[in-house]
Amino acid sequence: MNEAETRADYIDPALRAAGWGVVEGSRILREYPITLGRIEGHGRRAKALTADYVLVYRNHKLAVIEAKALDESLTEGVAQAKNYAGKLAIRYTYSTNGHSIYGIDMTKGKEGVLDQYPTPEELWSRTFAEANAWRDRFLTLATGTGKTFIAFQIAWKLFHSRWNLSDWKSGREPSRRPRILFLADRNILANQAYNAFSPFPEDALVRIEPEDIRKKGKVPKNGTLFFTIFQTFMSGPPKDGKPSPYFGEYPPDFFDFIVIDECHRGGANDESNWRGILDYFAPAVQLGLTATPKRKDNVDTYKYFGDPVYIYSLKEGINDGFLTPFKVKQIYTTLDEYVYTPDDKLIEGKIESGKRYTETDFNKIIEIKEREAHRVKLFMQQINQNEKTLVFCSTQDHAPRHKSSPPAWMRAISVTSC
């Protein structure tokens, strides 16, 4: 008996006997896609990861089942079951050959042979041992969004459960919709988010823009989801000779929940002008979203928000097929270190005689256009120019500098800062 026959004759009946797909609110997702398969190039992918069964109850994925043929070992699918449960962040997972069931509790590390599958209510009680009225209100799922926007999913659940800080802190029944702010540092990001939230009622969405504020003479307050950028909130006409940013027209506790998109780009920095916005709305729950790993230049972000609630590593993204594998190629030239001599022509700035400038100084402190032109030429020779390519430069100013080069006989040096 092969796996398909084992599933039809043994596993499916056992799940039905336990109430899965029978009890109201329970579902069985078959051949559930987990990853797309690692990208191998030339339009090919490695085999995708697919769970044989995912058990869902009250809109929560509660368990994974890996099925094997009747004549295979009971524990043959244990490694797969654990891998799938880990990727889906599901606590309980099972391996079965139809005859018996091998269960694993991923949280406690307990595993062993079971007589039968737990019922939907039993598995729910084990997963959520402590009663939580607010969690039960968050069972609504968003539809039609592709499940791709974390911020959307959270906002959707908060919106439909009527979660808000005042009721939550007091333990009262929810009395109003939450007020949620999506804060970005670029208009294109704020606009993209605004469009992505289109499944919400139209009158719930508010795009905060300076021109509208000036026309109406006040900031918008009627709505549920507000979208704007730091720059808009920081603008505003001075009053009595003092700065009067628009965000100050809201009470500090106006927003219940704030999403800061690309939070590594300065909003949480101790010296940032934008930090005042986050501090002003301190009563709100603040969620920072970033795809940038922790580095020296964004350590303030992690200091402000604390340890990440969820991490999805670059390696996982590549292995799961959501990101493209890459190789690092180091480019070396005869000018990877530089010491100024009187024979060189200094175009602008000041240069320190005798100082050895290294790779970290180029295009931040010192610029040699010939060197950059040559490095770009080498780079273009090594890539497939018909494929999509992302190029990262040292600074915003560095990016547009390769449009022209000085004559080959002239070594031109420009010092941007010291």
Image: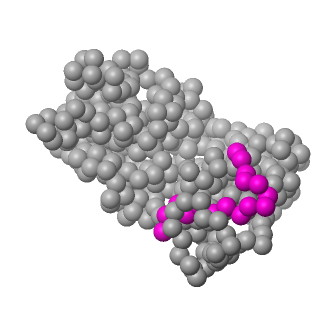
The residue nearer to you, when weighing 154 against 251, is 251
The residue nearer to you, when weighing 256 against 10, is 256
The residue nearer to you, when weighing 368 against 272, is 368
Q: Is residue 412 magenta?
A: yes
Q: Position of residue 29 (x, y in %)?
A: 66, 38
At x 63% / y 46%, what residue is drawn? 400
At x 89% / y 45%, what residue is drawn? 42
> Taking 15 as reference, is 415 left or right?
left
- Identify the main secondary structure in magenta: loop
**Colour setting:** one colour
Can residue 116 be seen at all in this image of the molecule?
no
Q: Is residue 173 above or below residue 37?
A: above
> Taking 411 as reference, is 137 left or right?
left
Q: Is residue 276 above or below residue 23?
A: below
Q: Position of residue 72 (x, y in %)?
A: 84, 59
Most extreme residue toward the left, as rendered? 240
> Taking 128 as reference, is 278 left or right?
left
Q: Is residue 90 magenta?
A: no
> Taking 110 as reference, is 140 left or right?
left
Can residue 237 be seen at all in this image of the molecule?
yes
Where are the magenta residues, as a range? 403-418
Most extreme residue toward the front, as rendered? 343
At x 25% / y 26%, what residue is drawn? 219
At x 65% / y 76%, what residue is drawn? 341
Q: Quadrant of residue 183?
A: top left
